[in-house]
Image (spheres, rainbow, N blue to C red):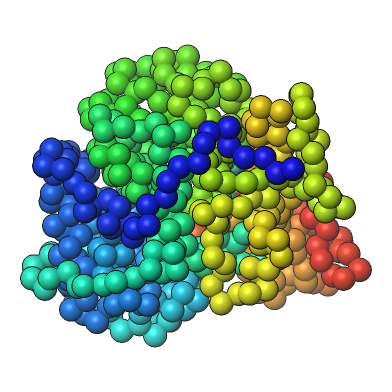
């Protein structure tokens, strides 16, 4: 028998994200601050945000963007991101969010694959953006630079356009709201088709359990371009009429200053930030007393580290689990359940069904009457599960089976009480500081080197025990390449978080008879 949430199902409004977030703002909500720029303290109220979203939608429509179009957004977190993201959706278009650290080549790949014909970026990222746009055949007039750049339209131009937001009518259940990229269980990054309903559902499913409320000041350092920041910050926190405090990137002193000065109450993090909060001496120099909750996700949180953060900050530390393909949240430790161990990812969100499957036999693993189950691959169903991968039926059918189960590629156990714990990762995916690194992409990069005959990339560990990309490389006859040469070669071609950080030279890559890399034999080698 599959297992479900111990909580009852919730109603999922049949609305677009805009209608969910912006059409039921009360007079008091309108006056509240929706977004604060952490660096400058500049504030945007809900009324001003809604006006900006409408104005951006009108300006995009005036530039020919409409239902069915894909618009790329390539920017670190800022108040402008919030308005532009929702403006794209309000115009009836689909937003594909590009990692702010992407190289020109990576930007091009996403623009081409997603079919985006308009790109919104910021001046510090302009060189990658213009290189990517040019390679994807997007004219420079279609590259809008939010903070302004010679020869490009800016956010100010969009806001001054004056065209009304268009009348659009889309079916929330089928219309694609966003196309974030994820490598899923295997291969290169793919566009994850998420409808308005997927996103609205995941907010409805997780809002009560996450516990952000209207009085919360929520630190938004996790990138909005990744599904965690997108759903939990851009959507859930705004639905709850909380205040988002944006930071463009993580920097410990600035992070601590902003949490202190902005009196942030809710801090969403990925595990590397927990390590800094637990151990760094600088933490004692700031007043973090407003913080009630630190919530971690995107990679395994060490239970000891989490406990140390809770004691040091005198706050609740919880975590959630999910993946892009589930919009993303499927399990989390709910508010008020600090008794659940931090070594677990908590309970299943409402409206979802999950089961564990033995990866070898494909048999379902039973949920025990007492104690904890055997480990198996976590498989999930629910209204938050993606439609599929864009233009990739093969990858879709490998991930969502004929019975509709999404295979997460994660190995978990479940207790009699429904508490899920992650044990291992079955899929190739590597997580570096919570960011996705697809081994297939790095292997292709390595194979482009004329002196490399074969290569395999797996997750290794650095001295601190953090997961890192590790390459096994077979050199061509007579090649004189060092480990450092290999790392430098890759570093010149990929975003910094994808760098290969360990290299092992070997004679042959272990492969199955069908030619698949036997990654298990390399992990721990
Ligand atoms: C061990 O990282 C994410 C989603 C993060 C998220 C989800 C719900 C954060 C908070 C929240 O409440 O998505 P992706 O697609 O980038 O990566 C998905 C993969 C998972 O399959 C799993 O391997 O990231 C890993 N992962 C985790 N691993 C995600 N969260 C966790 C976790 N512990 N808490």
Q: Determine whether, in the image, residue 285 is placed left or right of residue 302.
A: left
The answer to whether residue 63 is above or below residue 488 is below
Q: Nearer the viewer, residue 237 or 459?
A: 237
Image coordinates for residue 501, horizontal then vertical, percent: 63, 50
> Does the rendering let one see residue 104?
no
The answer to whether residue 456 is above or below residue 207 is below
> Does the rendering let one see residue 510?
yes
Quadrant observed for ligand 1 in the rendered image? top right
Residue for point 66% across, 66% down: 187
Residue for point 52% across, 36% down: 8
Image coordinates for residue 272, horizontal then vertical, percent: 51, 36
Q: Nearer the viewer, residue 480 or 421?
A: 421
The answer to whether residue 421 is above or below residue 352 is above
Q: Nearer the viewer, residue 77 or 48?
A: 48
Location of the N terminus by quadrant is: top right
Residue for point 86% across, 60% down: 510
Image coordinates for residue 488, horizontal then vertical, percent: 59, 59
Residue for point 42% across, 46% down: 11
Q: Determine whether, in the image, residue 464 is placed left or right of residue 88.
A: right
Q: Nearer the viewer, residue 343 or 368?
A: 368
């Amino acid at each position: 028998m599959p297992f479900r949430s111990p909580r009852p199902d919730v109603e999922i409004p049949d609305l677009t994200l805009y209608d969910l977030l912006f059409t039921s703002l009360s007079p008091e909500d309108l006056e509240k601050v929706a977004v604060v720029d952490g660096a400058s303290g500049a504030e945007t109220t809900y009324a001003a945000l809604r006006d900006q979203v409408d104005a951006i939608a009108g300006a995009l429509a005036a530039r020919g963007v409409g239902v069915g179009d894909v618009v790329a957004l390539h920017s670190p977190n800022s108040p402008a991101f919030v308005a532009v993201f929702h403006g794209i959706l309000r115009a009836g278009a689909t937003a594909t969010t590009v990692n702010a650290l992407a190289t020109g080549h990576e930007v091009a790949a996403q623009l081409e694959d997603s079919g985006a014909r308009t790109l919104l970026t910021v001046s510090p990222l302009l060189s990658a953006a213009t290189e990517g746009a040019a390679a994807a055949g997007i004219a420079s007039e279609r590259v809008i630079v939010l903070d302004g750049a010679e020869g490009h339209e800016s956010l100010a131009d969009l806001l001054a356009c004056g065209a009304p937001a268009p009348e659009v009518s889309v079916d929330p259940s089928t219309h694609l709201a966003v196309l974030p990229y994820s490598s899923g269980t295997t291969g290169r990054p793919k566009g994850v088709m998420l409808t308005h309903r997927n996103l609205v559902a995941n907010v409805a499913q997780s809002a009560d359990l996450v516990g952000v409320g209207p009085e919360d000041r929520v630190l938004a350092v996790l990138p909005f371009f990744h599904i965690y920041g997108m759903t939990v910050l851009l959507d859930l926190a705004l639905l709850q009429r909380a205040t988002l405090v944006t930071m463009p990137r993580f920097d410990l002193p600035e992070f601590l200053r902003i949490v202190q000065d902005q009196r942030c109450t809710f801090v969403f993090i990925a595990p590397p930030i927990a390590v800094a909060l637990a151990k760094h001496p600088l933490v004692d120099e700031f007043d973090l007393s407003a913080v009630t909750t630190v919530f971690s996700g995107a990679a395994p949180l060490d239970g000891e580290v989490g406990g140390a953060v809770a004691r040091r900050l005198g706050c609740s530390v919880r975590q959630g689990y999910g993946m892009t393909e589930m919009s993303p949240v499927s399990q989390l430790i709910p508010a008020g359940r600090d008794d659940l161990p931090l070594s677990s990812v908590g309970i299943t969100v409402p409206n979802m069904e999950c089961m564990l499957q033995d990866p070898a036999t494909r048999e379902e693993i039973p949920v025990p009457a007492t104690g904890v189950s055997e480990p198996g691959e976590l498989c999930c169903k629910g209204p938050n599960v993606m439609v599929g991968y864009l233009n990739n039926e093969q990858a879709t059918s490998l991930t969502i089976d004929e019975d509709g189960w999404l295979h997460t590629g994660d190995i978990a156990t479940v207790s009699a009480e429904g508490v899920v714990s992650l044990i291992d990762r079955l899929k190739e995916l590597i997580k570096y500081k919570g960011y996705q690194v697809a081994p297939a992409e790095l292997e292709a990069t390595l194979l482009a080197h004329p002196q490399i005959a074969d290569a395999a990339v797996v997750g290794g560990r650095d001295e601190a025990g953090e997961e890192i990309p590790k390459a096994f490389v077979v050199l061509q006859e007579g090649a004189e390449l060092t480990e450092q040469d290999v790392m430098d070669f890759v570093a010149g071609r990929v975003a910094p978080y994808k760098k290969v950080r360990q290299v092992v030279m070997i004679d042959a890559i272990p492969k199955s008879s069908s030619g698949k890399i036997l990654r298990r034999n390399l992990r721990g080698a």
